[in-house]
């Protein structure tokens, strides 16, 4: 029989370092982000001061080792921080999410020592990164991409365009996927590190979105963009592995973002229902309202447990593909449902921008779409179940 001190901790039981980061992220979100949320949403732009503060707080390089001027933290710590930031504003949540779970992880897992030394200190301290995979004709079918890379001397020449690129307006370092051999299918795909000032690179159309409006989502263009061959991330023709590995990890980050959205909407609903009076008492005293609050809280907790479990599995080197897909799928469903119920509980006030819940509802919708649609997650889950 196992002894009591050998019992594994609960999923929601955090280490002291994880607790400290959670509280620091929560305090930062409340004191610095919340006062700016409405203005950023209306302007559809991140406050530039916040971008600097994210770096100053160490939130843009959580997993980057201290050797490269990062925080030297863990993947799970990134997830905890993303959840807390997204609880206040999902736009800033995805801003740091993409940096940590996609861009930084790609460099940490696939970069040579030379690339790490050149780029990780920049990503940890001052440079925003972006992940460029999707194209107009390749969304869920990501490896149908048309962007090409042809060798010319010691460089590659990239031509094509990328769509729906998060952080494109703020980024200086772009991880771009292109094919060196269109006839080779996914085996021609290669990952390239492109800097904003490289010849032939430009950021163009910025999308006018329903939700996460302060997060920049832009098209990028590559017109004979010259990239030195030493900026290949991983191996030539193995970019599909880089893409799949990072997206699997990134889905956990999106799950954390959705948990944060749901918790933010729940917090607002709890506060409002204990203040709003109808028929001479707080509406939280009505059984029908209390049951809705209980269901919301239960669904949020199930989503959080799925996200935390997949993050712990990843962090411990265990298989997490199915669990990450479940976390992303379920958390997206919960965020949309909880934020919708929060609007219902606010009544007419929930439908106006003076109150916070309509924004949570708008922000939640993207969870079912980016970094793998809900249908793609269901396909992954069922495929793994039937193996």
Image (spheres, rainbow, N blue to C red):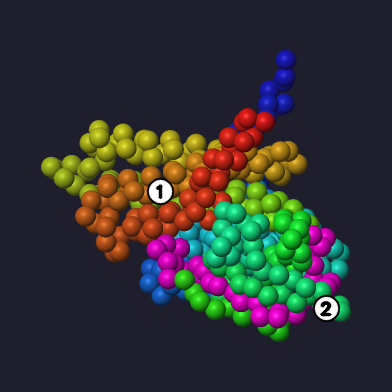
Vertical relation: 92 (above or below) 344: below
144 and 259: which is toward the camera: 144
Identify the residue at horizontal 74%, vertical 68% (top origin): 192
**The magenta stretch spans residue 113:** no
Q: Which image quarter is the C terminus in?
A: top right
Tag 2's secondary structure? strand
Residue 292, picture quadrant: top left
Residue 327 placement (x, y as % from top left): 55, 42
Residue 68: horizontal and vertical position, in percent?
79, 66
Point 25% across, 33% down: residue:
287
Q: Dot 1 corresponds to which residue?
A: 336
Q: Nearer the viewer, residue 191 or 58?
A: 191
387 versus 115 height, above or below: above
The part of the image, by quadrant, that contains residue 3 is top right
Please give the name of the residue rendered at 74% of the width and 71% of the height, measured from the top-left corner.
149
Distance between mark 1 and mark 2 Cα atoms: 48 Å
Q: Which range of residues does the magenta coloring cover?
A: 208-237
**Residue at the extreme front:** 183
Q: Of the numbered discs in the image, which one, if any, rests on residue 92? A: none
Question: Which numbered disc, 1 or 2, marks the residue that appears first in the sequence?
Answer: 2
């Amino acid at each position: 029989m196992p002894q009591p001190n050998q019992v594994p901790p609960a999923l929601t039981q955090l280490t002291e370092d994880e607790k400290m980061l959670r509280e620091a992220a929560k305090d930062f979100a409340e004191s610095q982000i919340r006062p700016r949320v409405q203005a950023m949403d209306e302007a559809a732009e991140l406050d530039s001061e916040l971008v600097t503060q994210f770096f100053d707080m160490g939130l843009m390089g959580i997993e980057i080792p201290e050797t490269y001027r990062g925080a030297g933290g863990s993947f799970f710590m990134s997830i905890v921080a993303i959840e807390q930031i997204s609880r206040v504003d999902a736009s800033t949540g995805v801003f740091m999410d993409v940096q940590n779970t996609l861009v930084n992880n790609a460099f940490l897992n696939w970069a040579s020592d030379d690339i790490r030394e050149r780029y990780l200190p920049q990503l940890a301290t001052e440079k925003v990164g972006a992940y460029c995979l999707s194209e107009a004709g390749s969304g869920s079918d990501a490896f149908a991409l048309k962007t090409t890379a042809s060798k010319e001397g010691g460089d590659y020449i990239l031509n094509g365009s990328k769509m729906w690129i998060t952080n494109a307006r703020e980024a200086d370092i772009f991880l771009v996927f292109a094919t060196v051999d269109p006839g080779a299918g996914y085996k021609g795909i290669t990952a390239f590190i492109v800097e904003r000032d490289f010849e032939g690179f430009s950021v163009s159309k910025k999308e006018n979105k329903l939700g996460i409006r302060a997060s920049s989502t832009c098209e990028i263009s590559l017109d004979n963009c010259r990239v030195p061959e030493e900026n290949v991330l991983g191996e030539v023709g193995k970019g599909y592995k880089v893409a799949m590995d990072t997206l699997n990890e990134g889905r956990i980050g999106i799950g954390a973002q959705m948990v944060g959205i749901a918790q933010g909407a729940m917090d607002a609903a709890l506060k409002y229902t204990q203040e709003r009076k109808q028929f001479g008492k707080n509406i939280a005293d009505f059984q029908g309202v209390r049951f809705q609050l209980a269901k919301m809280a239960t669904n949020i907790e199930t989503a959080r447990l799925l996200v935390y479990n997949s993050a712990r599995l990843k962090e411990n080197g265990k298989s997490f593909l199915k669990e990450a897909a479940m976390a992303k799928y379920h958390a997206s469903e919960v965020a949309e449902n909880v934020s919708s119920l929060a609007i219902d509980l606010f009544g007419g006030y929930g439908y106006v921008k003076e109150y916070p819940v309509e924004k949570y509802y708008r922000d939640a919708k993207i969870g079912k779409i980016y970094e793998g649609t809900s249908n793609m997650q269901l396909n992954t889950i069922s495929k793994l179940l039937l193996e």
